[in-house]
Amino acid sequence: MAKNDLDALSIEELAALRENATDKLMEKVAARRAELEAELEKLSQYDRLAKKSQLAPVAKGKKSDEKKGDEVKEPIAKAA
């Protein structure tokens, strides 16, 4: 990119340069915003999965399988 001697430019040329720079900046910001929103959309699928797994109930063992004091109940084998 050529370096402009801003002191040599007229007011009209400076105003046009400012307008062009503002337009180009707005284009780049819009493009970057679109990139970030697309990335955020991709990542949001993992957020939804994480929330679903947090809402799922945790499986608990049966009360008969739990310890009672220091004693553990053993399953009774069925006769064949």
Image (cartoon, helix red, strand yellow):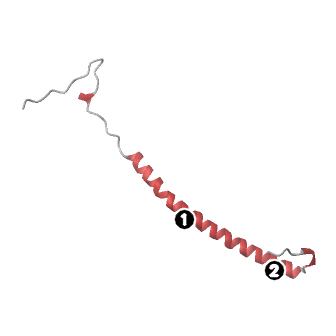
Q: Residue at x 28, y 27 (%)?
A: 66
Left or right of residue 68: residue 53: right
Residue occupying the point 86% across, 82% down: 12
Q: Quadrant of residue 75?
A: top left
Mark 1 secondary-structure assignment = helix
| Residue matched to label 1 | 38
Q: Position of residue 43 (x, y in %)?
A: 51, 57
**Compared with residue 4, is residue 64 higher up or lower down, i.e. above or below?**
above
Kindly identify which residue carries mark 2: 16
Of the pair 29 and 55, the residue shown nearer to us: 29
- Amino acid type, label 2: Ala
Q: Residue furthest top?
A: 70
Task: Indicate the quadrant containing the N terminus: top left, top right, bottom left or bottom right.
Answer: bottom right
Q: How far across and down, in percent of the image, does residue 17 sit?
A: 81, 77
Mark 2 closeness class: few <14, some 14–19, many ≥20 residues within 10 Å = few
Question: Which quadrant does the C terminus fall into?
Answer: top left
Going by the picture, which residue comes out furthest to the right? 7
